[in-house]
Amino acid sequence: MSRFASFREFYPFYLDEHRNPVSRRLHFIGSCGVIVLVVAALLTRNPWWLPAALVCGYGFAWVGHFFFEKNRPATFRHPFYSFAGDWVMFKDILTGRIRF
């Protein structure tokens, strides 16, 4: 059972788990890689790019957590909210709401 009733409640927790700027940068780079690899899958009509997208996105993010944040990724406890948090944080970095 989640202790968060909504994503609105979860997102401040998510940001608190991403205080380290190197970790945020790794998440951002991984998300950029995901976009590139999903586009490659669509353009080439080759679904083998999709597992690479997962490895890229989660690989960069988990390096950020294990080596810089020194915490356990929220993906393990809150997979759907965490996935949404990745993309909201990506947007917030793009728009300057969160420092890169």
Image (spheres, grey):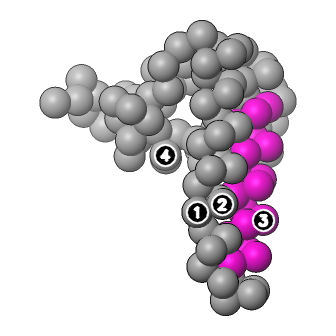
Sequence-wise, the earlier of marks 3 and 4 is 3
- Residue type at mark 4 is Phe
- Residue 46 appears at what percent x and percent y? 66, 84
User: Would residue 1 be found to the left or right of residue 43 on screen?
Assistant: left
Q: Which mark is residue 36?
A: 3
Residue 31 forms part of the magenta stretch = yes
- Picture quadrant of residue 8: top left
- Residue type at mark 3 is Val
User: Where 83 falls versus 39 (above or below)?
Assistant: above
Q: Dot 1 surroundings within 10 Å: few (below 14), some, or many (20 or more)? A: some
Distance between the alpha carbons at the discs numbered 2 and 3:
10 Å
Q: Nearer the viewer, residue 78 or 8?
A: 78
- Residue type at mark 2 is Ala
Q: Dot 3 surroundings within 10 Å: few (below 14), some, or many (20 or more)? A: some
Q: Which residue is mark 4?
A: 83
| Res 86 visible | yes
- Residue type at mark 1 is Pro
Labels 2 and 1 touching (C-beta < 8 A): yes
Farthest residue, direction front: 48
Residue range highlighted in magenta: 25-41
Q: Residue at x 60, y 10 (%)?
A: 70
Q: Dot 2 surroundings within 10 Å: few (below 14), some, or many (20 or more)? A: some
